[in-house]
Amino acid sequence: MEILLQTSTTSFLLYKVYAVPTEEFSMEYVEPKVLCVSTHGYFTEDSRDCVLRQFDKPASAMILYAATDGQLSSAPAVSPQQVENEDWRQRRQTGVSPVCGPNSDGILLKFPQTEISFTPNVPLPGRYVVVVHYHQPEHISFPVEVKVNAGREWKGSINASFCPAVSGCRAVVIADGRIALDFDQDSWQQPTISVIVPTKKILTLDYVMLVPDSSYTPDLLKEKPLNRSADFIQQCRGEGFYIDPNTSPQFCRDSARSLVAAFNDGALHCNCDKSGSTGTTCEPIGGQCPCRQHVIGRQCTKCATGYYGFPYCRPCECGRRLCDEVTGSCICPPQTVKPSCDVCQSETFSYHPLLGCEGCECSPNGIKENEGLDCDRTTGQCSCKPRIAGRQCDRCAAGYYRFPDCIPCNCKDDGVTADICHPDTGKCLCKRNVAGVKCDTCRDGSFYFDPSNPRGCTSCFCFGATDQCQSSSKRRGKFVGMRGWRLESPDQGEVTSVLNTASNTVVADVQELPPTVQTLHWVAPTSYLGDRVSSYGGFLTYQSKSFGIPSEGMTLMDRRPDVVLTGQDMTLIHMVQQVPLPDKLYQGRVELLEGNWRHAVSNRPVSREELMMVLAGLVGLRIRALYFTQTQRLSLGEVGLEGATETGTGGPGNTVEDCSCPPQNTGDSCQKCAPGYYRDGSGYFQGRCVRCECNGLAEECEDKTGRCKNCQYNTAGDRCERCKEGYYGNAALRTCKICPCPFTTSTNSFAIGCKEVFAGLECICRAGYAGDKCESCAPGYYGDPLTPGGSCRPCNCNGNSKNCDSRTGVCKNTLEPKDTDTNEPCQECDNCAQTLLHDLEKLDDAMGGIKTKLDNASASASSQDRLKKLEKLLADTKILVNNFDSGIKNQKSKTNQLEDDVSTLIDDINSLRDKADKRAADADKAVADVDKTHNRAKDLDADIQNLLKKIQALLDQLKDTGTSGDKPGNDNLTQMLEDAKRMVKEMQNRNFTPQKTAAEKEKDEAKKLLEYIKADISKQSDQNEVKAEKLRGDLKGFGDKLKDLDKALKEAVDHLKKANAQNGLNAQALADLKKRINDLQTERATVKDQMTMAENELQKTEDLVEMLSDSKTEYEQLAAQLDGAKTDLNKKVNDITKAAAKEGIVVKAEDHAKNLAKLANELEAAVKNASGSTEVRGAKDAIDAYKNITDAINAADTAAKEAKSAADNALNNVKNERLTQRAKDLKKNSEELLENGKAAETDLQGARDDITDLKKRLAKGDTKKKTLEKDLLDAQNQLKDIKRDDIGQMIDEAKRKAALANETTSDTMARLNAIKKEMNKIRVTPVDSNLDSVLDDVNKSVNDLLKTIPSLNDKISEVENLTSQFLPISNISENIKKMKNLIEHARDAANRISIPMMFKGNGHVELRTPKDLEDLKAYTALSLKLQRPLGRGDGARRRRQSTNTGDMFVMYLGNKDSSKNYIGMVLKNNQLYGVYKLNGVEYQVKTDFISTSLSEPATFDQVDLRRIYQDAEISFTKVVTSNPTGLKTEYNIKGQENKNLLDISPNDFVFYVGGYPDNFTLPPSLDYPKYKGCIEFSSFNDKIVSLYNFQKAVDINIDLPCKRYVPPVESFYYEGTGYGKAIIGTPSSILVIKLNLFSRSDNSLLLFLQMEENYFTVTIENGIIFLNSNLLPEPTTNNIKTFPTTAWVDITIISTDRNGMKVIVGNVEVATASPVYNTNTFKELYIGGIPQDLREKYNITMQPFKGCMKSLKLRSNVQDLTEQVGISNGCPQDSLVARKAEFRLKSSLSANLEGFSLADDVTVSLGFKSTENQGLILQGKQLANGMNLKLENGHVILNFNNKIWKSNKQYNDDQWHYLTVTRRSGSIMLVIDDEDKGQEQSGSSSIPEADGAIVLGKDTFRGCISNLYTRRPNNMYKAEDFSTFKTSGNVRVDMCTADTLAQLMLDRTAKKR
């Protein structure tokens, strides 16, 4: 055989040529197979150069190795034919790689040894999957028989495919259509496994692996991926992954070379320049060629800098300048003067020999007149006009704005920064703490406007209690007190000093101190310490002097702090600027401001807060004393400390703050706790002031410990929690009473405490007292505690203190008698006393003898009888005593009542007596006053008479004087006489009668009052006194009787005590027994419940296991079928390959298929145009929302049926895979479609005039039909030669599909006719009864649709599974994509059904699982409407039902296990409750009552639930279906920050509305009957959703749904996932499109116009509108930022043939373009987005539009949308909020969040995802408080006020994670994903200033952030809107790259599930 291969134009590498017999050929021979992954170096066929790869071997699997565990069968005789075949195999092996690697331990199975068996050593009960590992490099695929005998014989096989791989291949055994085989446990013999190879085949078997069914996965059949990235990172990451060619490990060098080769798609050519290089070989790494001298470049292509003349480069001869690299001519630097080129040209400056000069670029408007545009040659400064500054004179000087006019700023100079005002607007630039238009007032939270303050005003400190303060109204005063100052040395202690009172100076002699003493300080006394907050801003002054002789060597010592303050564990120091001089008086003065002090240890600056804290608790003040050596004496005087006080006389204390303290704080700076409060040590600065915990029994407590002071109501203890000594009772109930030990008077109670024991009290006596009631003295004490005022005192017996009489104190010493008077000195006894004592001693001896006899006496019979009688008498006496005792007890209550009445009466008598005495005293006083007044009146009258007499005598005297010679002047005398007469006349005429009469009347009334008091009140008082005396006598008698009773009761009390003790023990034992019984009963009930629950769970588990087993069996059968189908498919592919000669026929058939598809599209467009006619639109407007719904459902129904038919067709095509049958099928379908077209033409004849166009289209279709029939007939004639057995079956199937299509068309036309009839009947009235039929049609259509979609999904899944296993045939994947789009359109139509759903109390709806469950973790938004029917029945029946009608279930969203997370709603007594549970914590929100109404017209209430992390709010709007709507009320609740995520996996998610499955267990809080009434869903998590897009529905809409008022549609909401399509209509040379829209998005697609293969788009990119087209080289724009907007915007797009296209926003042109195109070719447009196929076709990636649109106008006419996807009615503002953003490197968002403060309690929650190891997530800094969240090495790092936390896990896994940071009472907590709380780290780091703003993302962060929540009051229960943030860099708001465009297009409320 000769083979000739010849080529003339192509070069290729010929490796080997194989000749394969025809009958053996297969496509497997030409398909490449992997041999191995080669090691670095040259490739060879030797497996030793391969990198070994591994398969996974589960630990639970049993491996049977062929070499050790297998047993070969005996070899049969060899046939000649077998030998011949074997020779051919040997010849073929000469060109093939080895069978297996050198490490292979397999067994070669070939004829004659073709079988091997395995017998496991132990039985293997259970279900196993048998996996065979083999090598097969010889043949194409062939079957290998595998027998398994394990109690049952399984005959299976594997498909041994061509496998030359060094690591081998695996296959699973399939027997009886399954892969999991049962190994019987009861088998009497061990299982065996046999592998049998066909006689003509060769197979190398490595091992057989038995894998338990529970451990098996399909991944076991695949090799583990060879991944060395971890090794590369570990070994080569040093120095930023720099790989040194010489020192790096060989692995790193080889890996780097592989990475570069992979990046460059192989090695790169050196391409060394032949002239500039010295060789052709370059460096293997980097590719640097070897260059000649002075030549540079990787390829050696140019001279080095400073050389010219490549390739023979020579040095330039231009000094410091450069030269031309070719000619070598010198190059002048730019803008220099030639020829020397060393001086700058005019209007340039800053000469450089290489760079030249820089242009002045002076502003013509800013320079002085006649100065020109030149500038300084060195600095470049231009000559500026007045008020103008800058090097180029291009801006206004500070204090001026609006260049070049430069108007003076109108600002207060002391309150602005250095720039004074904004250079463009003139807005004043205030200092940090200054506010106001002119910067003339202090900002809120600061005080005292001070020009010298860099911040303008001083921030309120107030010790963190408040931020409201003002300057103190007090004035400064200086405190000076030198008494108590002392001199101290750190090591020597105190140095003696003396106070000189004359000079008020403290002096100390230090010349005797040793020279080692280098430090001495004057230490202040306590009068200077304590609370010195009012000294802030004041001065500390002092006078010091170092005495000595400077000439004798007084040298200055090293610098040390001059003044030292200590307090609050801080030490602050001050260093003076000018040091003292020797032997000179030094005047020290330091201002108490933070800028003058430093920390002693770190020397860092002191903040205002730290200085205030030290001053609030100043514990030490030291002034440096020793400055010089050879100092003899030291002095200190006039130490003054200023402070603001009420009595100060100095300047005002403006720098001292006067805070508006909360009730718990007091002091000028809230530095103290108010009375009744103390510091708990937590919180800011010194700690919070919290209320004293004294149980309400004390007014104040100690400031630091909280220990209560002055406890009231006889209580004591740190918290007044117990009764004080000598009292008993309950301190909390204020029932502490004095212990009756023995009495309840304080003078006769001698117990330190007492307690109740059974029926009495047990006293705990003081030292010296004894007895149950402390009624006697203890040994060694004497006295009588029972007498009033009595007590016990120690005995005084000369050392024998315990030997005295207990009552008298007489010492008991017979040898030395004592006087009985213990208070007097003992006197010597006389003879009589001694004789008496002697007789008493004799009597004592006699009594002792009698006692001895009695003890020795025996008990005789008579004495026993006497004792028995005595015992009987005692028993009788006991009975009498008990009877008497019961009588006493009965009378005791009456006695007590009588005592209380007497006590009350005595109190009343005393009160009356006091009142009487007071009245009597008042009366006496009144009488005395009257008498006094009367006497004064008499005296006054007498005085007046005397005065008159004197005046008259004076007048007479004057007359006498007038007659004599001595008379005064006439004028004066006459005047005096006239005055005197006038005065006398006035006195005589003055009448005092009324006053006298009134005084006498008052006197009479006082006398009458006195008589009345004496007569009545005194009499009553006497009577009361008599009664009281009588009562005293009665009480005294009762007291005597009670004493007798007390004596008789003592014995009874003793017996009762014993009985009570025993009863107490019995009662305690009985209580213990009862408790144990109750506990056992409770445990029994619990166990019973748990057993019941366990049985239920076990039953569920068994059902689930059974279901899984059935599913697994079906899967195994399917897998077996698929594996068998592969073999058949390979054969069919070979057959198809042989049919390549008939390729032309197939091509023609495919062309006919394309024509058929085109015809189908035209028919579909015709039907759509018919629905868009004028009359139809009018009718559609008339029926309002209901008509839209009907059309949408009909369209969805039709689309679903067509999609189902197409899916079945595609599935059968894939399974049958016969080209001729496909051609026949296409032909038959075309005929049926044409017949359907004729039927459609006939049905539409009765429509109106506008359907004429449809007739024309059908006529064209008929013409095309004839053409197609002719073409198909020709194709049929050509295909006659091809014979297939199953053509008839395919034709029958095609007929069935055609019939189905015909039925679909007929059904569609019938629905159109029904709609037409209903349109003629319907009127505009919203509640027209004719709508009932429409609603019935809607319900039927919805039910049909929802029955079709699940089966359609199953078909699609089956098709996709098959297509993933077979080679692509035709365009099946494209058809599947179209089918999915049809499904999505159907579901979108279902979501836009805004019809309520009727629930009758026995049904429910299960909605689909939302797609974005990660977002649902942190954020939930639900909007629904509820209606309740009016109650039925009357009378008693209605009353009986009323208890149940108001309690019912509404919805449940959460985990299948209801004990975990969920959200739900229920009605309790018809009142709505929202319930949600997060990680074990349940919350309830109580709202309003649901309105009740008839179902037509129905009244609905709207419920809007918003949950953000742990907080939730429900907005309840009454009667939302009326116009206007009812009142809107909001209800909310706050949850716990550490448990705030709704974490539910997709497999565990359920969503029930209106009811629930009967086998579903609800949580107790939602366990109510199913709903009765109507429910309508509006949205879920900002997406439109309807109950009619359900996954499952049970017993709904049994009755007609409720009919309600539908408000008119004013706008449409584009949710950012879909689009709207409109038909342009009549062609025109001018096209005007007008949009009225509102959006907060700054990136979106607004408009898409298509004409043939070209398109135009209008997009928003970073807020700027762009106009783009494939006719333009690049997008065009005028760079005017338009979005996001805060109001509605009008956008106009104008397209003309002459002027091109332009976009106008309002009246501003924002984009324009003028490509060559024809406007007439525009047929349709898309608004807000485009379908996925157009995106893929034109590679358009811009996200769809999210926002609201009011109208679309074409040529000034409102245009309806013919197709809507992701569009709904209304404009929900909350849904426009941008809750997420994507950040690229160096990008960020920032905002000043009003109301958010880091100084108080803080809560910050957010979600993030990233793949980066590091990056800043969030940062905020406000004054001294700062927070920083970032990623470091994948860990989350929190820095809060210099405290650092680090997460335990790494989170750079590109998954969403949610974290919460909280600070409460100074305690900081970080929680990530509700589980990771991190660890606090040591150290600290600073946080940069952010001007109070919150910054998201910055520097190296790349990823996404979502759902930022700060709990600030201005934005409670809402996530922050990122569209309102300030953007820096490339930030994409409201999207994340993980949300791919396809995902956004299809993500419509989880419609894919």
Image (spheres, rainbow, N blue to C red):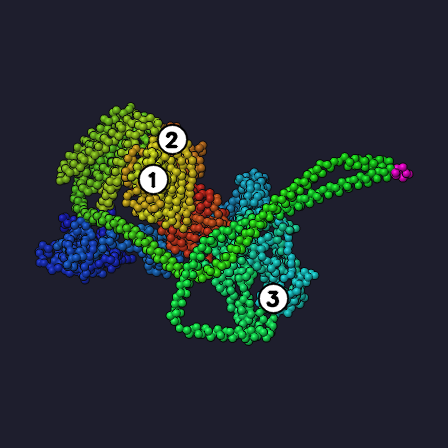
Residue lying at 58% horizontally and 50% vertically, measured from the top left: 1025
Q: Is residue 1205 left or right of residue 1887?
A: left
The secondary structure type at the circle numbered 2 is loop
In the image, the segment drawn in magenta is 960-967
Q: Decide: few, some or many residues near mark 3? Use Cα within 10 Å; few <14, some 14-19, many ≥20.
A: some
Where residue 1849 sits, quadrant-wise, is: bottom left
Q: CA distance from mark 1 to mark 3?
A: 88 Å
Identified by mark 2, the residue type is Pro
- Disc 3: which residue: 494
Residue drawn 52% across and 59% down? Answer: 743
Q: Is residue 244 visible?
A: no
Task: Compare residues 1384 and 943 and report the one nearer the observer.
Answer: 943
Q: Is residue 330 above or below residue 805?
A: above
Residue 1383 vs residue 885: left or right? left
- Residue 889 on image: x %, y %: 45, 55
Give neighbour class at mark 2: few <14, some 14-19, many 20+ (Cα, 10 Å).
few
For image coordinates 56% across by 75% down, the residue present is: 835
Front in this rendered view, residue 146 or 1841 = 1841
Q: Earlier in the sequence, mark 2 or mark 3?
A: 3
Residue 1748: where, in percent of width, then height? 39, 36
Q: Nearer the viewer, mark 1 or mark 2?
A: 1
Q: Residue 1715: x, y in percent?
A: 37, 34
Q: Quadrant of the C terminus?
A: top left
Residue 1493 in view (yes/no): yes
- Residue tagged by mark 1? 1444
Q: Is residue 1178 magenta?
A: no
Give residue 1608's mark: 2
Q: Are marks 1 and 3 in contact (CB under 8 Å)?
A: no
